[in-house]
Amino acid sequence: MSEAMTDAGDPGTDPATRDRTGPAGGDGGAEEPAAPTPLGVPREPTGLPAVDALLERLAEADRLPADGHLAVYEDVHGGLRAELTSLDAHPASASRPHDPRS
């Protein structure tokens, strides 16, 4: 049997399919993605514990691959929106009742 005949059925040696499948028995030459690297963006405390906790949650994105960032960002964004909305829900400082004599 000639070498040309044995290579014909092997997709790893067929030039028409080699680029799509990679060499026979290989992984197509795919490299592992680089490990996540922290951005090192400093976060300064705001003095509001709920907001500071949400901002600290952003540090979790530093340890996640890029496809995990969206969930963290959406969670933090939702929490910050809730904190802002709660500012409108708090009653204003109690004012004195109206004095009809004034």
Image (cartoon, rainbow, N blue to C red):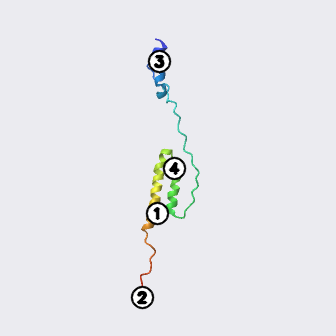
- Taking the spot 47% from the left edge, 49% from the top edge, the residue there is 70
The nearer-to-camera label among 1 and 2 is 2
Q: Amino acid at mark 1?
A: Leu
Could you tell me residue 100's position as x and y percent?
A: 40, 86
Could you say whether the residue bearing mark 2 is in a helix, strand or loop?
loop
In percent of width and height, residue 95 lies at 45, 78
Earlier-in-chain disc, 1 versus 3? 3
| Residue type, mark 4 in image | Ala
Q: Are marks 4 and 1 in contact (CB under 8 Å)?
A: no
Mark 2 or mark 3, which has the lower sequence index? Answer: 3
Q: What residue would you read off at disc 2?
A: 101
Q: Which residue is drawn at the image coordinates 46% and 58% (left, top)?
A: 79
Q: Could you tell me which residue is drawn at 48 percent across and 15 percent down? A: 4
| Residue that label 3 marks | 7
Mark 2 crowdedness (10 Å alpha carbons): few <14, some 14-19, many ≥20: few
Above/below status of 71 relative to 21: below
Q: Which is nearer the eye, 81 or 49?
A: 81
Residue linked to disc 1: 84
Nearer mark to the viewer, of 2 and 4: 2
Instruction: Give how far apart the Cα atoms at labels 4 and 1 are.
Output: 23 Å
Q: Of label 4 and label 3, which has the lower sequence position?
A: 3
How far, Cα to Cα, is label 4 from label 3?
48 Å
